[in-house]
Amino acid sequence: MVGSVRLSSLARSHVVVRYDDEVPRARAAVERADAEYAVVVTSDGVPLGVLGRPQLAAPGTATLTALADRCPVLAVVGGEPDELHPDELVDLADLVVREGLAFVLVERDGLPSGVVPRAAIEQALPLDLPDGSAVRSGNPDVAALRYVCRKCAPPTFHLPRAPEGDGRPPHCRRVFFHGAMEPDA
């Protein structure tokens, strides 16, 4: 079986840009920082999506909100602790395969701290390994640690990696008014 992996070792460089920035300005920020990704956030810092260099290559001066339909499914992974245990890695790989994700966003203290591309997850764990027959280890009475907001289009996923203090599911990360996210089986 695969051993523990550090999320920080899988993460690639990124810059944080506001959704009301223009595409050329976001592209310049990515190039200036020699980053691979731009994490698009609201004015409150809530992540809306992640764009790679190819998505930012679009000509024109539209704002990033105009590219919102190009933002792939957003999956957010809690970054604490940095060590990702084998069952968490399998759970993450399962989500990546099932949803066809190109990357996941890592957050620490509610702020983007890295973008983990699918290729890095593939290197850490062969993505053909999860076969859907796996059973989540641990106490079955513990709340799910993978949530989805199906009100978002495309859906938003959140893997907090530690239960919320009050035992309730987290609220949608993209649109607060969507309310509580539902457990993702």
Image: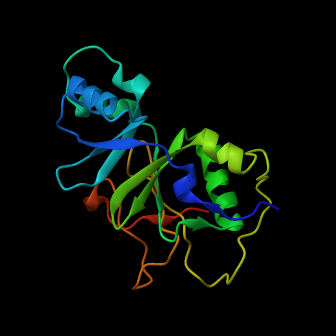
Q: Is residue 132 left or right of residue 163?
A: right
Q: Kindly indicate the quadrant of the structure image that contains residue 44.
A: bottom left
Q: Kindly indicate the quadrant of the structure image that contains residue 27.
A: top left
- Quarter of the picture holding the C terminus: bottom right
Q: Hey, which residue is sitting farthest top in the picture?
A: 59
Q: Is residue 27 left or right of residue 151?
A: left
Which residue is rendered at x = 39% and y = 70% of the image? Answer: 170
Return the residue nearer the eye: 168 or 160.
160
Return the residue nearer the eye: 79 or 178.
79
- Where does residue 7 sit, x and y in percent of width and height? 55, 58
- Where does residue 40 sit, x and y in percent of width and height? 30, 42
- Where does residue 8 sit, x and y in percent of width and height? 52, 56
- Where does residue 43 sit, x and y in percent of width and height? 17, 50
Q: In the figure, 142 relative to 27: above or below?
A: below
Which residue is rendered at x = 20% and y = 23% of the image? Answer: 62
Return the residue nearer the eye: 135 or 8.
8
Which residue is rendered at x = 39% and y = 30% of the image? Answer: 70
- Quarter of the picture holding the N terminus: bottom right
Q: Tell how many labels.
A: 0
Q: How is the image coloured?
A: rainbow
Q: In the figure, 24 relative to 1: above or below?
A: above
Q: Is residue 28 left or right of residue 166?
A: left
Q: In the figure, 168 relative to 5: above or below?
A: below
